[in-house]
Amino acid sequence: MELLIMISACKGGSANKITAVLPYFPYSRQSKQKSHRGAITARMLANLLSVAGVHHIVTVDLHAAQMQGFFGRPVDDLHAEPFIARWIRHNVPDWREAVVVSKNAGGTKRVTSLADVLKLNFGIVTMDRRRGNPASSMALDGPNGSTANYHDQGGRVTDRATVASPVGFERTNDVAQVNGSGAGSHAEAGPDGSAPDHGEDSGDDSADGRARNVVRGRLVHGQLVDDDFPSPPNSLSASVTTAAGEIPVEQTPDAMTASMLSSSSRLSGVVDPVALDAGVSSDDDEAEEILESFVSEHMITVVGNVRDKTVFIVDDIIDKPRSWIAAAETVVKRGGARRVYCIATHGLFGSHSLEELAKCDCIDQIVVTNSCPISIEDQRLTKKLVVLDISILLSEAIRRNHYGESLSQLYDQYYE
């Protein structure tokens, strides 16, 4: 609101050009509808800036690059990646042997960009909404809670369960296989039920290598546990209360029923089952609270070789700590990583999140920029926190914009 007032004051003072510099664009996560008839707050804020009279917007690392289409004015979305890459080169020992990891599927583009700059390998961490079979962490249940069965060509029923994994992997029992033909594709069993003979050049070694690069773990109430840890009761028969009564989470209502349940749930002030069944958005940290409240057990998967390596877990915003801690614990305790750095451009640090991240033994350092103000008291809470100064980036952007110079060089990787 203060920014809009200043823009209006400058416009009333007959300013020739008004440029709004927002190192962190607020409400950037709300760039799309996350529920039925939900507000797209980022677009509303963009419209407010345009109506107030701003001519140019300068910001850093928008949550979604397509948000620039919300504005009716030119937008310069600067990147803090050069500063992060420079800090890694100068402060991380053996960084050339490290791995860049995305903690959700939505951040893979950002992670691959940093990996390309540093010429490193990259990985991904994904989290499943609910865990089907409590007896094994390697299989999913069928649609009604029973183990999914499959029929072979002879009509026999087998208990082979296929688990969906990210980036084109399929997991059958304990072996990860890549979709498509060749050594990584699925092969039919022999007539006697035995495994087919592929010969000496069957590619089994490469398949085993892919299996070793996929690590899975169990999360119970947000904490990483062993596979033999007993499942909590509500993870077996989770249900939500609506105006129509209790409905199991595993049951997906049809479109018409879902609409009726959604309306009645909101009117009665209880949980919307449609929002629960919609799945976790790849970049939606708010949905983690729903996961912990109603489905207490789910699975986390790490794709990529992180054993005995330094891991950079990268995202654009650090707000809530649960997903960061879960990813760090998984790559260390299950993947065998040596050191973990949590890196983001914007350090929002919601209530007590910095304290919880600092208490995690699996996190060695937390690296953010000063795009969001971090108080001196918060910086003194832990020695793990590193704040990178990007004021030179914004000041150069302001200078070039004022004198009509090109800003293209600010997007190049020249901060060595």
Image: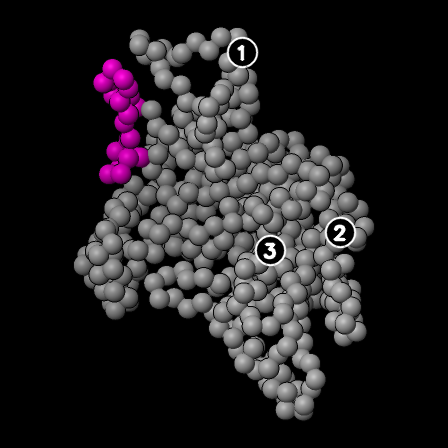
Taking the magenta stretch, the answer to whether it contains residue 155 is: yes
Where is residue 197, by image quadrant? Answer: top left
Relative vertical location of residue 321 with respect to residue 174 in this rendering, above or below: below
Residue sitting at x 78%, y 68%: 405
Q: Nearer the viewer, mark 3 or mark 2?
A: 2
Would residue 33 appear left or right of 5 to someone viewing this image? left
Q: Which residue is mark 1?
A: 201
Q: CA distance from mark 2 to mark 1?
A: 43 Å
Per the rendering, the mark at residue 254 is none
Q: Amino acid at mark 3?
A: Asp
- Closer to the camera, 208 or 353? 208
- Asked whether disc 3 touches disc 2, contact meaning CB atoms under 8 Å apart, the reply is no
Looking at the magenta stretch, what is its main secondary structure? loop
Image: magenta residue range? 141-159
Looking at the image, tell me whether mark 1 or mark 3 is earlier in sequence order: 1
- Looking at the figure, which quarter contains the N terminus? bottom right
Relative vertical location of residue 211 with respect to residue 277 in this rendering, above or below: above
- Closer to the camera, 19 or 270? 19
Q: Secondary structure at mark 3?
A: strand
Residue 54 drawn at (x, y percent) = 62, 79
In this rendering, the count of numbered labels is: 3
Q: Which residue is mark 3?
A: 316
Q: Amino acid at mark 1?
A: Asp
Residue sitting at x 52%, y 41%: 125
Residue sitting at x 38%, y 50%: 279
Q: Amino acid at mark 2?
A: Gln
